[in-house]
Image: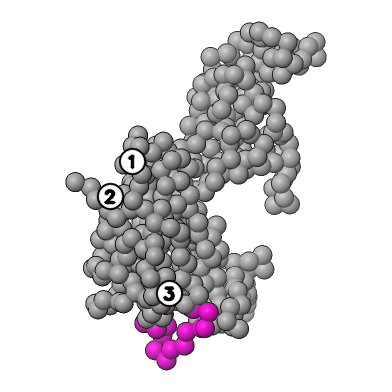
Amino acid sequence: MNDTQLPAAFLDIHVIQTLPLSGLNLDGDGTPKSVVLGGVTRARISPPSKKRPVRKHIEQEFPDQEAERTRRLVHEVRDLLVRAEGWTEDLATFAARDLFTAASGGHMSLGSSADDLQAKDPLSTAAFIYTPTTTAHRMADTAARRKHDYEIALKEAEAGTTKPQRATAKSKAKDEAGTVTDPADLEGLLAGANASIALLGRTLMEIDGAERDACVQVASAFTTHEADIEIDFFVAVDDYAAKTKDAPAVGLIGDRRLVAGTFYMFSTIDLQTFAEAIDNDHALAREICRSYIDGFIHTLPKTGQTSSAAWTMPDLVHLAVRTDRPVNLSTAFDDPVTGRHGHVDASIARLSEYAKTIQRLTAGRGLLHSVHAYTGTTKLPGLGTRVDAYEQATESALDAAFGKTP
């Protein structure tokens, strides 16, 4: 724990990146998402499709901070009891339901279907539960210590002789809870959070204390220029028919919608709120922030990559460390960029010029540090110090945000 106030309040991440023809983020009709801005249609990538690969990137680097978002926590506990403890499925299912009721204080119900895409499941939760991966194991461990109690309670429940009760009930209030496991044994479990959850936030209104405001904000990415949706017509060949005389070789005809363009992407980290959320462990906060920046730079949605392989790298990464508030520079592209030889250079120049204008209008207010790395070799006015590599830019920004490490 570190009681020292961080020098900075926010770390802004700006990325210019060109993606080839692909469908990385589609709407319900299978068409690339779009937005009308500056009187023209732009391709768009929504924040959730960007945040998930970044989250998985962080958790891959920090396995002890891994979390999962699921409606199948009860399934997971049941399966752990069957596989690891050798319980019968009936007993494991009974215990998993009981454990969940105890852990949620009876405030969350089972058996709901949140949408038409999910079949009604008696063990699923209506709300997504975002929790550390250790949660299911802790619940299973609690049940394992009380297997005999659960065996008795299940027999009584099957016989219909009594409502399941905790073998160690100590008060009338607890008796009324009707769970084998004492809720006090699992109190606060579903409200628990690790650094990943603290950073990305959680909505879980049914559990007291489980709400977590996100310490990162992600904007919808959009093309800096007008983008046209392309229709990609395809034919799939039936290999056996192709070898058969007079048999039609065409097995399938179809089409898909794709788009290409140069995107502006923006995210910001609320540094002080994040540090407070993890008990002011500045060393851990710095490492998680480094991983988040790295993930934001290096990851893309995986949807459609099999047929597009759109694994490009950013053309520009600009990091700004601020003491006051975030500054999204997307207004630089309200007037769509036009270019005869692509949009990258014009987009970078537009961003640099707009950032310089903002600094002039605010007299540099709140800007503690500014750095950039890009495909060019000259310094860009408005985007601070130029460095050669993304990692250099990241370390430079983190030094400013957290105080230079010795």
Distance from the alpha carbon under mark 1 to that under mark 2 = 10 Å
What label does residue 4 carry, if any?
1
What secondary structure prevails in the magenta region? loop
**Would you say residue 30 sits in the magenta stretch?**
no
* Crowding near the residue tagged with mark 3, few <14, some 14–19, many ≥20 C-alpha atoms within 10 Å: few
Pair 2/3: label in front: 3
Q: Can residue 93 be seen in this snapshot?
A: no
Residue 141 percent across, percent down from the top left: 51, 21
* Crowding near the residue tagged with mark 1, few <14, some 14–19, many ≥20 C-alpha atoms within 10 Å: few
Q: Quadrant of residue 47?
A: bottom right
N-term mark: 1 or 2? 1
Pointers 1 and 2 in contact (C-beta within 8 Å): yes
Residue under circle 2?
A: 403
Q: Quadrant of residue 280?
A: top left
Name which residue type carries label 3. Leu
Residue 4 percent across, percent down from the top left: 33, 41
Residue under circle 3?
A: 361
In the image, is 359 to the left or to the right of 74? left
